[in-house]
């Protein structure tokens, strides 16, 4: 199986998903499957780096496309959203159904989990009702063997009437055979005869009345399946049918008459819309059970015993939350401890580079203002951002990905589901909140997994209450200087991690409180229910974790931060070096803001630093240092003790430190996150709301803390 190094370059239009083939002979392969069956692993293993992502037209659901070559043939793989059903009760199900029905894929590969095949067969059977161009991929065979589960793939293929291939995608086993069967099916070398599911007599009678009346042109799904959906009254499908095929029961007299006759027959049999859907689902489930019982055999009926024992601890009411907090604290301790040395090494490297640039500018006789603008401004700001951000991210993201690979993140969502339900929010918000620890913009994009538009907005608006990687350095520095400084050695890093964990827990509490306030005011409504499948615990693949976390997350977030930090450095240097009278523009702005800032325990320079740090949270501390030292450029101090002395000399107290920490935790999102919110919500109003809600919350909390501290003489 050969992989090319070219991107497909496909884009998305407003009407349909545009797939650009590298060659007219390339085949389109849709990759479907339940969540947590390894579909993304199959996709990544087949396409390698040859992939890109975008949005489905009109939907906030991500699509991924990739390209691979197999035996000199090209295939464009489209990774459609993971779903349990194609009956379109969610955006993901609607998108998956529509692409299978109307996206004209040459083959649909349905990925299943060998350890729970019976549950996955429901989606396979629904897909077979739509199209006969199906290849079933039974993935995770290595996990199944480890648990003593064996599957007769040949018998499964015979019963389903379509090709079946067994794979262990994480190790690449079976993918060659999978693509062989996909290639044979697309070339017409295999003539599938998919299983036809028979329903009860009354439903079959209704289908016989309606099916002959369905006449559609072009690439359309199976007429029998269309008849089932018309009898069910699937409004989303009717709308799509009208757009794609011009099939409209209201305008087609013959079809409308047949539909009324068929529905009347069902009503006479006591089958209304709800009962009809229940009968269809029950038949699919019973058929999946029957097939599974014939092809699956278990040597050990208690193969899930270990997972259940772990879940009794990790998801219990008594231990679930404490273990979650302890793991969070451990990750922060490792991040704090491990990031110090590489941060220092990076800064030294950038300082060496700055000296070389200074020599170059001197050689060129460049004017001082040009050196200041490009080196003291832009280069030094970039150096700060990279040296401060890269080491923590390089540690935090792999550990976060490790928990994801182990299967622990869904357990976090399970533990927090009840809290979010009480806040009238969605349980999946726990997962999007976790994504925000790395980058709030990524957390906002992750909110696409929430089906309810109301609950999705709540998750987007409150995502900023968990600190992103750009805010961690400020929090860690302040905690170490003002609260953990009395300790020494390893105890200091442990104490810092404990306090930082407490700050994070406060952020989670604020997320829940604000979510409840939003759900009772501007976003009223009841929380919706959802199915959360707890995947089996799996042995993580360390190599994949490192590559995925460093390439897909660390460098991506770092590049985005650097892109906004560079122009921010130019602006900051300009404001610090353009004077009006005896003061710089930066000092004038800080003096103007000072009376307002004092209400919240800060000074004007701190507030100005937060404002100028809008492009990237990482540059807030450097701006404060620059303002206090009045150097007109970003400077570095040798250690935190020097920084603490500088802050105290400029009026910092414990109250200032706490207020700055709280406002850093609860203030407006950075520019990248704001831009992402606008893109996701497609509304400036909701983007403005996402800025105002955390900012006003932070101002109120800091104001109350400051005024109470002064009232009781604590400062």
Image (cartoon, rainbow, N blue to C red):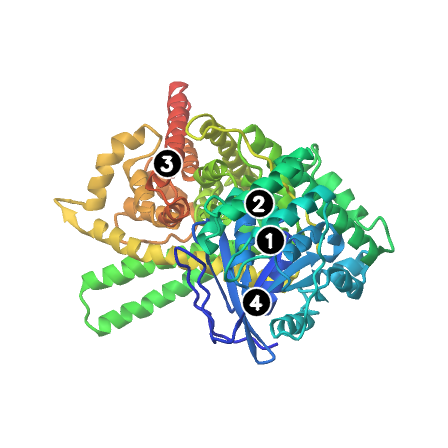
Task: State whether residue 364 is above or below residue 589.
Answer: below
State the residue at coordinates (40%, 57%): 560
State the residue at coordinates (38%, 27%): 700
Q: CA distance from mark 4 to mark 2?
A: 32 Å
First reached walking from the N terminus: tag 3 or tag 4? 4
Q: Secondary structure at mark 4?
A: loop
Is mark 1 in CB contact (under 8 Å) with mark 2?
yes
Task: Tell me if I can see residue 321 in this picture.
Answer: no
Which of the image's four quarters has the C terminus?
A: top left
The residue where tag 2 is placed is 258
Q: Residues within 10 Å of mark 3 (few under 14, many from 20)?
A: some
The residue where tag 3 is placed is 689
Is mark 1 in CB contact (under 8 Å) with mark 4?
no
Which of the image's four quarters has the N terminus?
A: bottom right
Q: Nearer the viewer, mark 4 or mark 2?
A: 2
- Left or right of 292? Residue 697 is left
- Left or right of 479? Residue 653 is left
Q: CA distance from mark 3 to mark 4?
A: 44 Å
Q: CA distance from mark 1 to mark 4?
A: 26 Å
Q: Secondary structure at mark 1?
A: helix
Q: Secondary structure at mark 2?
A: helix
Q: Nearer the viewer, residue 16 or 146?
A: 16
Q: Residues within 10 Å of mark 1 (few under 14, many from 20)?
A: few
Residue 106 is marked as 4
């Amino acid at each position: 199986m050969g992989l090319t190094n070219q991107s497909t370059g496909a884009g998305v239009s407003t009407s349909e998903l545009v797939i650009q083939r590298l060659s007219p002979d390339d085949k389109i392969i849709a990759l479907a499957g339940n969540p947590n069956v390894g579909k993304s692993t199959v996709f990544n293993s087949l396409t390698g780096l040859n992939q890109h992502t975008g949005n489905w037209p009109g939907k906030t659901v991500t699509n991924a496309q990739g390209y691979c070559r197999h035996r000199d043939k090209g295939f464009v793989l489209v990774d459609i959203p993971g779903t349990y059903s194609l009956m379109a009760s969610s955006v993901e199900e609607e998108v998956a159904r529509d692409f299978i029905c109307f996206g004209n894929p040459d083959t649909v590969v349905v990925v299943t989990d060998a350890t729970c095949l019976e549950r996955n067969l429901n989606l396979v059977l629904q897909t077979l009702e739509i199209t006969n161009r199906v290849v079933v991929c039974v993935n995770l065979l290595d996990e199944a063997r480890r648990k003593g589960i064996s599957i007769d793939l040949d018998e499964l293929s015979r019963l389903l009437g379509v090709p079946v291939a067994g794979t262990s995608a994480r190790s690449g086993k079976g993918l060659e055979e999978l693509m062989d069967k996909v290639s044979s099916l697309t070339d017409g070398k295999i003539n599938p005869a998919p299983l036809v599911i028979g329903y009860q007599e009354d439903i079959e009678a209704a289908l016989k009345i309606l099916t002959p009346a369905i006449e559609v042109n072009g690439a359309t799904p199976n007429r029998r399946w269309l008849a089932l959906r018309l009898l069910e009254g699937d409004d989303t499908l009717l709308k799509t049918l009208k757009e794609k095929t011009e099939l409209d029961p209201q305008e087609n007299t013959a079809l409308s008459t047949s539909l009324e006759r068929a529905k009347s027959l069902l009503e006479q049999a006591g089958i209304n819309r709800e009962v009809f859907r229940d009968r269809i689902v029950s038949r699919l489930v019973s058929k999946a059970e029957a097939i599974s019982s014939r092809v699956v055999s278990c040597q050990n009926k208690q193969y899930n015993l270990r997972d259940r024992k772990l879940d009794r601890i990790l998801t219990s009411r008594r231990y679930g939350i404490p273990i979650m907090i302890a793991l969070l604290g451990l990750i922060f301790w490792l991040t704090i401890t491990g990031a110090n040395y590489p941060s220092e090494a990076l800064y030294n490297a950038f300082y060496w580079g700055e000296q070389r640039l200074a020599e170059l500018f001197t050689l060129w006789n460049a004017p001082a203002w040009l050196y200041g603008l490009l080196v003291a401004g832009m280069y030094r700001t970039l150096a700060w951002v990279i040296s401060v951000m890269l080491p923590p991210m390089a540690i935090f993201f792999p550990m976060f990905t490790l928990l994801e690979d182990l299967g622990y993140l869904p357990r976090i969502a399970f533990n927090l589901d009840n809290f979010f339900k009480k806040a009238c929010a969605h349980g999946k918000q726990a997962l999007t909140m976790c994504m925000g620890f790395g980058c709030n913009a990524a957390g906002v994009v992750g909110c696409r997994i929430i089906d309810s538009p109301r609950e999705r907005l709540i998750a987007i608006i409150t995502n900023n209450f968990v600190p992103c990687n750009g805010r961690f350095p400020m929090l860690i520095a302040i905690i170490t200087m003002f609260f953990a400084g009395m300790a020494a050695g390893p105890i200091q890093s442990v104490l810092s991690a404990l306090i930082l964990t407490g700050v994070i827990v406060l952020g989670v509490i604020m997320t829940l409180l604000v979510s409840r306030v939003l759900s009772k005011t501007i976003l009223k409504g009841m929380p919706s229910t959802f199915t959360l499948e707890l995947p089996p615990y799996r042995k993580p693949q360390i190599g994949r974790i490192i590559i995925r976390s460093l390439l897909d997350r660390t460098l991506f977030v770092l590049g985005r931060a650097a892109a906004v930090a560079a122009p921010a450095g130019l602006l900051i240097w300009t404001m610090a070096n353009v004077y009006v009278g005896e003061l710089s523009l930066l000092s004038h702005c800080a003096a103007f803001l000072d009376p307002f800032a004092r209400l919240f325990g800060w000074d004007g320079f701190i507030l100005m630093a937060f404002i100028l740090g809008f492009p990237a949270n990482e540059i807030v501390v450097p701006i404060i240092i620059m303002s206090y030292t009045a150097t007109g450029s970003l400077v570095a101090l040798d250690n935190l003790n020097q920084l603490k002395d500088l802050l105290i000399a400029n009026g910092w107290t414990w109250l200032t430190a706490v207020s700055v920490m709280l406002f850093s935790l609860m203030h407006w999102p950075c520019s990248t996150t704001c831009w992402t919110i606008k893109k996701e919500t497609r509304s400036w109003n909701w983007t403005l709301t996402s800025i105002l809600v955390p900012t006003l919350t932070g101002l109120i909390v800091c104001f109350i803390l400051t005024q109470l501290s002064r009232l009781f003489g604590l400062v």
